[in-house]
Image: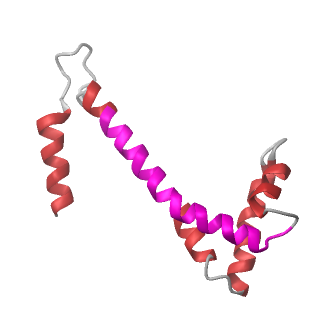
C-alpha cells in the first residue's frame, strides 16, 4: 500500500497534492513524535518539492526492503521448519522447508 501511494503521488497533480497532504497528516496522531515526523516527511512546513523527492526515493527503495524481508523470512523458515497444524509438541512434527515448501512455492511461482 505504501509503494502504491508513493507512486500515486509522484504524478503530482492537484488531487495528488491533496492526497499527500491528507495521508501524511495521519502521522500527526502518533504521540510525542508525530509533529516532528510530519516535518521530516514534508521536508519543511508544508508538502513541497522536497516531499516529492522523498516520496520518489521511498517509492524506489520500499520494494527492495520488502524483498529483503521476504528473503529473511524464508531463511528463518528454512532454518527452523514449520510446525504442523496439529500443534503437537516436539521436533518430530516439524515440516522442513526443503523439499516440501520449496516445491510448493516453486509451483505457485510458476503458475
Q: In terms of image quadrants, where is residue 109?
A: bottom left
Q: Position of residue 77 (x, y in %)?
A: 29, 33
Asked if residue 54 can be seen in this view, the reply is yes
Q: Position of residue 47 (x, y in %)?
A: 79, 71
Magenta-drawn stretch contains 77: no
| Along the line of sight, the residue nearer the viewer: 85 or 69 | 69
From the viewer's perspective, is residue 11 above or below residue 57? below
Q: Which residues are magenta?
A: 46-75
- At 78% across and 51% down in the image, what residue appears? 37
- At 46% across and 58% down in the image, what residue appears? 63
Q: Position of residue 36 (x, y in %)?
A: 84, 50
| Along the line of sight, the residue nearer the viewer: 69 or 43 | 43
Asked if residue 82 can be seen in this view, the reply is no
- At 58% across and 69% down in the image, what residue appears? 5
Q: Main secondary structure of the magenta part?
A: helix
Side of 22 relative to 83 (left or right): right
Side of 73 relative to 27 (left or right): left
Amino acid at each position: 500500500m505504501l509503494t502504491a501511494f508513493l507512486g500515486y503521488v509522484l504524478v503530482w497533480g492537484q488531487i495528488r497534492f491533496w492526497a499527500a497532504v491528507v495521508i501524511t497528516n495521519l502521522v500527526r496522531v502518533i504521540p510525542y513524535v508525530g509533529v516532528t515526523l510530519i516535518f521530516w516527511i514534508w521536508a519543511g512546513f508544508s508538502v513541497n518539492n522536497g516531499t516529492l523527492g522523498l516520496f520518489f526515493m521511498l517509492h524506489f527503495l520500499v520494494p527492495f526492503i520488502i524483498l529483503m524481508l521476504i528473503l529473511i523470512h524464508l531463511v528463518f523458515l528454512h532454518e527452523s521448519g514449520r510446525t504442523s497444524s496439529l500443534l503437537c509438541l516436539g521436533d518430530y512434527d516439524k515440516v522442513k522447508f526443503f523439499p516440501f515448501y520449496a516445491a510448493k512455492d516453486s509451483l505457485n511461482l510458476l503458475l
